[in-house]
Image: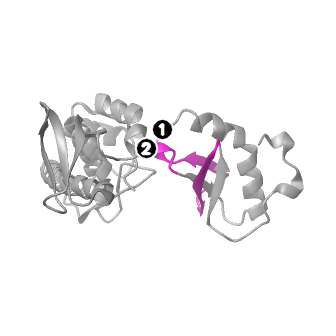
Amino acid sequence: MPLGLLKRSFLPRPAPVKEREHHVAGRTLPLRIVENDRARRLTLRIDAGGRGLRITVPPGVPSREVWKFLYRHQDWLEERLAKVPKRPKVRVGIKIPLRGVPHKIIHVEERRGTVSQGEFEGAPALFVHGDREHLPRRLADYLKRQAKKDIEKLVAKHTATIGKRAKAIRFRDTTSRWGSCTADGTLSFSWRIMMAPAPVIDYLVAHEVAHLKEMNHGPKFWKLCEKLCPDTDRCKDWLRRNGGALQAIQFD
């Protein structure tokens, strides 16, 4: 609804809630309201894949001002969400990429609970065994296992190069970022990165490992990142252009 048609009486009442839902562009999206001591103004962001909304607010901003801010940007949200890739659901017969290579999903009732790689009619395929209703979850679990196997090896390689060690490696299904590095050296990665080409996976790991030494995005950081992954620019651009489509795939 355009702001000009929005009457004051239709604004949601102020409430101390930090999470709610918001209806926009024919969708119902989870909305997170995050108070940040360093924020100087309200900012609105669409999570990767259009899976949710996030408003960052300075401390002490009244709830009514947050809702006014949100509805002022309703047209902007509708325009941006119209460009977000559709969210295909994981199901039998479609293809999803594994390390950048499209694999057709084939359901097999035998051998409950397993996923295996192979070929179907001469093309790469993922064979998901067991009850059909559990197929999306089993594929997600399979990608998590593949991520753990590949990324732990890449972390070991890149940390050896810079002479730093990671405190821990975690895997999540994050909507706002592909990876992160905390001040104590904990690295986190979205397991969805296993759908990207192998060089892009390597770039993401190199990026987060570089943060173990340079906790910023300054010139020294990018120089180190390029040392670990000479193809940094191309891989970063690939993730920027294609990451939203990977985040949009529904595994639930």
From the image, tell me which residue sits under label 2.
248
Q: Nearer the viewer, residue 38 or 237?
A: 237
Lower sequence index among marks 1 and 2: 1
In this rendering, the answer to whether 44 lies above or below 36 is above
Q: Give the amino acid type for the residue marked by disc 1 in the picture.
A: Lys
How crowded is the residue under tag 2: few (<14 C-alpha within 10 Å), some, or many (20+)?
Answer: many
Q: What secondary structure is marked by label 1?
A: loop
How crowded is the residue under tag 1: few (<14 C-alpha within 10 Å), some, or many (20+)?
Answer: some
Locate the C terminus by quadrant: bottom left
Q: Residue at x 74, y 48 (%)?
A: 71
Give the x, y percent position of residue 82: 58, 34
Is residue 222 in view? yes
Instruction: Determine whether, in the image, residue 218 is placed left or right of residue 224.
Output: right
Tag 1 near tag 2, CB within 8 Å: yes
Residue 236 is one of the magenta-drawn residues: no
Residue at far front of view: 109
Give the x, y percent position of residue 91: 33, 47
From the image, tell me which residue sits under label 1.
86
Kindly indicate the quadrant of the structure image that contains residue 72. top right
Q: Give the amino acid type for the residue marked by disc 2 in the picture.
A: Ala
Locate the N terminus by quadrant: top right
Quote the CA–CA distance across marks 1 and 2. Answer: 7 Å
What segment is highlighted magenta in the picture?
25-51
Residue 36 is one of the magenta-drawn residues: yes
Q: Nearer the viewer, residue 73 or 162?
A: 73
